[in-house]
Amino acid sequence: MQEKLWKRISGPLRKVNKEIIRMAENVTDPVSYTQVAEFDFVLSNFQKIKDQVNELIHTVTRNEKLKSQFEIEKLFSQINPHFLHNTLNTVQWLVRLNGQKEIDRLVTLLVSCTERACRSWRAKPFSILFSATHPFSRSTTLSLSGRRKAAI
């Protein structure tokens, strides 16, 4: 009789243990029930835990992907003003070498604006806000990335 009772308890206990070990291998597989109410109750709660773990894994994975995309966007928004600044700086020196003083003054204004944008510690949409005192300048408005406007 003891042996029969032991088999009735040990079989479902092994199954519960097996489900715990299986979770480490594959979190998504549903648990396999024992047909013993008490053990099935434990396994049902264990299935709820597995579902919560799966949901948390999914949430963490999604958040990490979003974080990665945000980091890439942040990097690009930092690179663009820096690239523009370097390009304008090169143009500035070429203009100076050719003795084009009027163009040099305009490019110098642009370079100073890009320096401010590059010094900003936060990644923001790039904007240039200045007014040029060049004789050819009219209050011309340019739209940059559809958000900010600059008067040149």
Image (cartoon, rainbow, N blue to C red):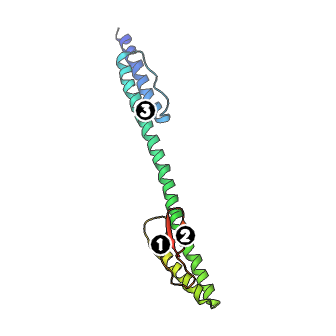
Q: Amino acid at mark 3?
A: Asp
Is 63 drawn above or below residue 50 in the view shown? below
Cβ atoms under marks 1 and 3 closer than 8 Å: no
Q: Amino acid at mark 2?
A: Leu
Which is closer to the viewer, label 2 or label 3? 2
Residue 139: where, in percent of width, then height? 52, 76
Nearer to me, 60 or 145: 145
Is 1 drawn above or below residue 68 in the view shown? above
Q: Residue at the location (65% across, 89% down)?
A: 98
Report how far apart the C-alphas of labels 1 and 3 lie in the structure: 47 Å
Q: Which mark is residue 117?
A: 1
Residue at mark 3: 51
Which is closer to the viewer, label 1 or label 2? 2
Which mark is first along the chain, 3 or 2?
3
Report how far apart the C-alphas of labels 1 and 2 lie in the structure: 17 Å
Q: Mark 3, residues whose alpha carbon is within 10 Å: few (<14), some, or many (≥20)?
A: some
